[in-house]
Image: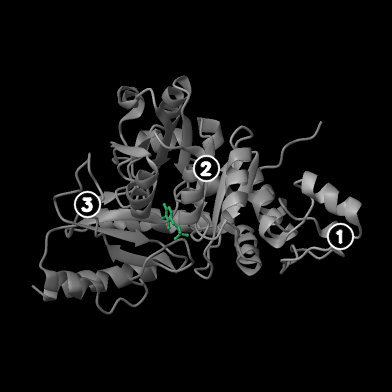
C-alpha cells in the first residue's frame, strides 16, 4: 500500500522530476514562445492534448512544476499560475461568474479584491454584496436565486477575523454556489481549503510561497469540477507568468515549512509581548487564546503565519511618526511573507461597508520576519520610547 506523503515531504519533492533532466535537482527554466514540432501529426496531437507543450503562453515544464507542487501540497486537482496574486483573484472571479450573477464577498477582503468587484465586475453586470466575516451559517439569509459564488478570505486583511469556512461552504453548496478562498495568509501548509468545502483556492504567491520579496506571482488551485473553466479562461485571456519568476516561486516553496514555522513562532512571541504593553489596546492574532477567532482557528488551521495586527492607543500624528521613525529592523512597506519584518499603519477608509473598523486606537499591521525575536522586540521597545518622548 502506498502511503501519501506528509506536507513537508511534498514541499520537498512535489513537482520535481530530476530523472527527466539529467538528474538535476531543480526544474529547468524554460524561456519559450515557439515550440517546434517534427511533423504535422505531432502538431495536430499537441492541439488536442493539453499536457503537450505547444506554445510558451499555454504553459511550459517550468510553470507545470510550480503548479503541480502547489496543487499537490494543497490537495487540489490542478493549478493555474498568474503573474500576481491579484491577477489570480481577477482571473478566478472572471472565469466563474457571468452578467446577472450575485456574489457574496467578505467585508474583510483584501482591498484590491473589493476594488476589482466594484470597478470591474460591476461593469460586466455582476453584483457583489459584502458580508460580515463572522457571519457563519447565517450567510444563508443573504443568498438570492442568482447568487453564484462566495469569496472569502480568512483571516481577514488587516482585521484578522477568522471565518467559519465549513459552515459557509455548506450553505453555498446547498444553494449551488461556488466557494473561492484567498488562502494567502495561511498558505497550503496551515489551511487545507479543499478539506473545508472550498472549490478554488487563490494565493498571492508573492508572499510566503516566493518568500524572499523578489518576485510577483499568483496561483489558483481548483478542484476537478472548477479547473477546466479556470484553465480555459486563463488561456482565452492570455494570462501567464514569466519563467524566472516561476522558478523563484518553486525555489521559495522548498523552504516554506521551516520558514513558516519560524514566522509563526516569532509572530506569536511579538503578539504576546505587544499585548502586555500599555501602549497597545488589543492585538489581533488568532493564535492568542482570547482572540474572538481563536476557537475556529484552532479547529480548522494547522498554524499561524507571521502577519497580525495591533491597535495602538490613540496618539498624535507626531507620536505616530516618531514611533515609525528610525526603526532599525522593521521595514515600512507593502506586501509581506518575505524573510524581513515589516510594519505599517492601516489606511482602510471605504474598505468596510457592513462591519466597523476598530475605533479604539490606531490599527497597525506587523509582519514577523526571520530576525531574532529579541532584536525585533528591542526595535519595538525603542519605538515606544520615541512615541513617549514625542508627547
Ligand atoms: C498581497 C495580497 C494579494 C495580492 O497579491 P499580489 O501578488 O500583490 O498581486 C491578494 N490577497 C492577499 C490576501 C494579499 O495579501
* Mark positioned earlier in the residue sequence (3 or 1): 1
User: Does the beta carbon of the residue at mark 1 sit less than 8 Å from ligand 1?
Assistant: no
- Which dot, 2 or 3, sits closer to the camera? 2
Q: Mark 3 points at which residue?
A: 350
Residue corresponding to mark 2: 95
- Between the C-alphas of marks 3 and 1, the distance is 53 Å
Relative vertical location of residue 308 with respect to residue 322 in this rendering, above or below: above
- Image quadrant assignment for residue 163: top left
Q: Where is residue 51 in the image (x, y as percent from the top left)?
A: 77, 48
Residue extending furthest toward the left: 391
> Quick check: can you spot residue 287?
no
Residue located 14% across and 49% down the image: 359
Pointer 1 residue: 37
Which element carries disc 1, helix, strand or loop?
loop
Residue 52, percent from left and from top: 79, 51
Image height check: is 189 above or below 179?
below
Amino acid at each position: 500500500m502506498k502511503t501519501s506523503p506528509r506536507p513537508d515531504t511534498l514541499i520537498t519533492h512535489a513537482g520535481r522530476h530530476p530523472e527527466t533532466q539529467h538528474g538535476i535537482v531543480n526544474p529547468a527554466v524554460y524561456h519559450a514562445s515557439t515550440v517546434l514540432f517534427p511533423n504535422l501529426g505531432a502538431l495536430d496531437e499537441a492541439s488536442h492534448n493539453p499536457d503537450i507543450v505547444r506554445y510558451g503562453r499555454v504553459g511550459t515544464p517550468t510553470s507545470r512544476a510550480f503548479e503541480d507542487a502547489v496543487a499537490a501540497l494543497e490537495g487540489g486537482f490542478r493549478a493555474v499560475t498568474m503573474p500576481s496574486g491579484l491577477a489570480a483573484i481577477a482571473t478566478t472571479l472572471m472565469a466563474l461568474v457571468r452578467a446577472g450573477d450575485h456574489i457574496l464577498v467578505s467585508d474583510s477582503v483584501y482591498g484590491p479584491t473589493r476594488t476589482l468587484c466594484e470597478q470591474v465586475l460591476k461593469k460586466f453586470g455582476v453584483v457583489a454584496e459584502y458580508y460580515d466575516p463572522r457571519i457563519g451559517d447565517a450567510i444563508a439569509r443573504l443568498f438570492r436565486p442568482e447568487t453564484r459564488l462566495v469569496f472569502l478570505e480568512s483571516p481577514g486583511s488587516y482585521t484578522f477575523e477568522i471565518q467559519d469556512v465549513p459552515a459557509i461552504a455548506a450553505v453555498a453548496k446547498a444553494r449551488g454556489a461556488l466557494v473561492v478562498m484567498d488562502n494567502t495568509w495561511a498558505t497550503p501548509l496551515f489551511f487545507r481549503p479543499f478539506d473545508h468545502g472550498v472549490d478554488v483556492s487563490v494565493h498571492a504567491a508573492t508572499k510566503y510561497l516566493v518568500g524572499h520579496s523578489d518576485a510577483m506571482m499568483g496561483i489558483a488551485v481548483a478542484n476537478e469540477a472548477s479547473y477546466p473553466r479556470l484553465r480555459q479562461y486563463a488561456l482565452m485571456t492570455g494570462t501567464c507568468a514569466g519563467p524566472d519568476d516561476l522558478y523563484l516561486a518553486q525555489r521559495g516553496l522548498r523552504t516554506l515549512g521551516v520558514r513558516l514555522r519560524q514566522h509563526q513562532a516569532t509572530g506569536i512571541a511579538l503578539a504576546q509581548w505587544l499585548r502586555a504593553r500599555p501602549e497597545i489596546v488589543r492585538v489581533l492574532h488568532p493564535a492568542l487564546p482570547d482572540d474572538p477567532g481563536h476557537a475556529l482557528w484552532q479547529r480548522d488551521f494547522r498554524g499561524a503565519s507571521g502577519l497580525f495586527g495591533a491597535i495602538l492607543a490613540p496618539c498624535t500624528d507626531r507620536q505616530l511618526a516618531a514611533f515609525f521613525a528610525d526603526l532599525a529592523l522593521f521595514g515600512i512597506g507593502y506586501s509581506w511573507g518575505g524573510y524581513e519584518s515589516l510594519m505599517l499603519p492601516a489606511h482602510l477608509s471605504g474598505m468596510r461597508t457592513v462591519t466597523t473598523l476598530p475605533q479604539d486606537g490606531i490599527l497597525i499591521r506587523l509582519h514577523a520576519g526571520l530576525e531574532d525575536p529579541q532584536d525585533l522586540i528591542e526595535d519595538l521597545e525603542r519605538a515606544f520610547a520615541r512615541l513617549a518622548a514625542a508627547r
